[in-house]
Amino acid sequence: MLREIVKPTNEIYNLRIPHEYINQQVEILVLPFSLTNTMEKQSASMPKRSLAGALNQYANPSLIEREKEIAWQKVAENHK
């Protein structure tokens, strides 16, 4: 991967392509760097949500008790 942060002084900019990318399709993006910083700051300020319990509606209570027993049996089988 190539990432380059530059401050162009002209509308034309020459970019050196790494040898391993020659004859391959590549994607070149040009984004204002300040926009990237703003997005990172917004992401950092967003509240962190936990996924714990998100799939609780799909839980099968009758299998939860057996889960520990089944898991230990599988671990024991794999270490024989």
Image: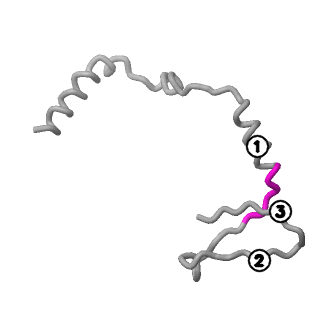
- Mark 1 residue element: helix
- Chain part drawn in magenta: 29-34
Name the amino acid type tagged 2: Asn
x and y, in percent, of residue 49 in the image: 61, 26
* Proximity of marks 3 and 2: CB atoms separated by less than 8 Å: no
Is residue 31 on the magenta stretch? yes
Q: Which corner quadrant of the image does residue 19 belong to?
A: bottom right
Q: Main secondary structure of the magenta part?
A: loop
What residue occupies the far right of the structure in this picture?
10
Q: Where is mark 3, residue-wise?
A: 7
Residue plotted at (26% across, 22% down): 68
- Mark 3 residue element: loop
Q: Earlier in the sequence, mark 3 or mark 2?
A: 3
Residue plotted at (20% across, 33% down): 75
Q: Where is mark 2, residue-wise?
A: 14
Name the amino acid type tagged 3: Lys
Q: Where is mark 1, residue-wise?
A: 39
Q: Earlier in the sequence, mark 2 or mark 1?
A: 2
Up-down relation of residue 6 to residue 48 (above or below): below
What residue occupies the far bottom of the structure in this picture?
23
x and y, in percent, of residue 45 in the image: 73, 30
> Which image quarter is the N terminus in?
bottom right
Q: Earlier in the sequence, mark 3 or mark 1?
A: 3
In space, the residues marked 3 and 1 are separated at their CA atoms by: 19 Å
Label 2 neighbour load within 10 Å: few <14, some 14-19, many 20+ = few
